[in-house]
Image: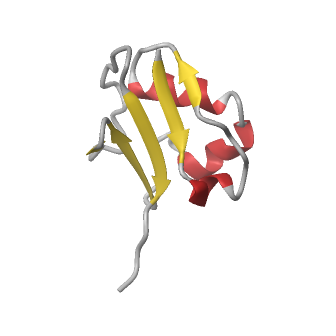
Amino acid sequence: MVTVEFASSLRRHVECAPQSVPAGSLRAVLEAALLAAPALAPYVFDDQRGIRKHVAVFINQTLVLDRQNLERLLQPGDRVLVIQALTGG
């Protein structure tokens, strides 16, 4: 199983406890985790089902750089963290 956690900056919009979902592509893992809180999906995905510009996804503490191609395969034991990226200057 893969653990998916949504940071508090996203959970303030829609509560979603950490999810344990079957391993698969990053897209499949995120979609499975979002089944617990479907209203959170628009905060994570854009209208093309890519990761939104102001959201960062980490796999085992490594930032996912490609927001469109989410076919990277995750392995049992992997951890995914989804956070709202900070912008500004």
Residue at (31, 35) in percent of width and height: 60
Seen in the picture, residue 87 relative to 26 is either above or below; the reply is below
Q: Nearer the viewer, residue 44 or 22?
A: 22
15 versus 85 height, above or below:
above
x and y percent of residue 30 in the render?
Answer: 51, 31
- 27 left or right of 72? right
Q: Quadrant of the C terminus?
A: bottom left
Report the front residue among 47 and 4.
4
Q: How is the image coloured?
A: secondary structure
Is residue 58 at all visible to an observer of this figure?
A: yes
Judge left or right: residue 62 versus residue 30.
left
Query: Residue drawn at (46%, 61%), measured in percent from left and top?
Result: 54
What residue is rendered at 40% in x and 81% in y?
A: 88
Give above or below for 8 relative to 49.
Answer: below
Picture quadrant of residue 12 = bottom right
Image quadrant assignment for residue 67: top left
Residue at the bottom extreme of this rendering: 89
x, y (%) of residue 78?
A: 36, 24
Residue nearest the viewer, comparing 20 with 43: 20
Residue 2 occupies quadrant: top left
